[in-house]
Image: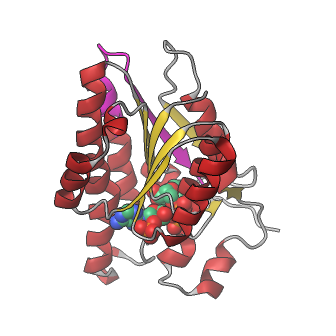
Amino acid sequence: MKNEKIIITGASSGIGFSCASLFAEKGNNLLLLSRNIEKLKKEAAKWEKDFGIRVDVYSLDVRDYQAIDKLFSQLPDFWNDVDILINNAGLALGLEKIWEGDRTDWDTMIDTNIKGLLYMSRFVVQKMRARNKGHIINIGSIAGTQVYENGVVYCATKAAVKFISDGLRIELVDTPIKVTNIQPGLVETNFSIVRFHNDIKRAEKVYQGIEALSGNDIAEIIYFVADTKPHVQIAEVTVMPTNQASPISIYKK
Ligand SMILES: NC(=O)c1ccc[n+]([C@@H]2O[C@H](COP(=O)([O-])OP(=O)(O)OC[C@H]3O[C@@H](n4cnc5c(N)ncnc54)[C@H](OP(=O)(O)O)[C@@H]3O)[C@@H](O)[C@H]2O)c1
């Protein structure tokens, strides 16, 4: 796969950054979106030079519909024919029972994981339908099919990602446009640091005693999914570390 035009949300870290790095190395053009873009801009300049590709980086909060609207109205024409959208921006916040949960954490998860993904999809799918080509790749989670205590709202947002993916696939069934939902288990990224509001020690414990997946492991799977023949649509991928069997069934040495 080469010379494709790919949008990645949440490209500043973890899975999104790994995807950007791999798709760049393979010779694809990238439109990278995140709130923190200083580090990403430096990488982008390096990738453009090393791989002869175009990498545009914009600061964007996917919760902000007006900002997305403005971005799409101002984008260079080059981005009119986007081939792939990777809806990756997302987060979990907190680990509490519903009656103890922080309402602002809930709002942030719902606004980012569900509404942000919907907003981005609305703009990009319109363009994909106009040219009858494209692939939406959503980053869901095993939490979207198996709920666990203290993480109910996060799980509910990822269940929404599963249903949005399934529904969009149905709505696009008479087109060549593909929809994939990637559902990872434990991936060692900034995810737990964000979840525990920067309590790094607590975050580290999540990955102690188990070889978790890396962002690069997920990027390789996403690349495989994106590189299938036009008539092959991988609808879902569920991937976990070998020592994980469900969100709470985890063997640790
Ligand atoms: N790590 C896991 O175990 C795991 C498992 C299953 C699914 N996932 C999912 O994988 C996706 C990526 O997470 P990760 O593990 O790579 O975590 P990460 O390292 O914390 O990366 C999250 C990315 O999302 C971006 N982001 C967050 N809120 C945003 C917003 N409002 N607007 C734009 N970008 C935003 C962050 O960028 P900025 O802060 O710069 O905006 C960052 O680039 C998420 O959807 C997550 O739910 C993760």
Can residue 118 be seen in this snapshot?
yes
Give the residue drawn at x 32%, y 50%: 117
38 relative position to 241: left or right: left
Q: Dividing the picture into quarters, in which one does residue 114 lie?
A: bottom left
Task: Classify 209 as above or below 184.
Answer: below
Can residue 91 be seen in this snapshot?
no
The figure's colour scheme reads secondary structure
48 or 179: nearer the eye? Answer: 48
Quadrant including the N terminus: top right
Percent x, y of residue 14: 58, 61
Residue stretch rendered in magenta on the structure: 165-185
Marker count (numbered)? 0
Percent x, y of residue 153: 34, 65
Q: Dividing the picture into quarters, in which one does residue 178 lie?
A: top left
Quadrant including the C terminus: bottom right
74 or 131: nearer the eye? Answer: 74
85 magenta-colored: no
Give the residue drawn at x 61%, y 36%: 223
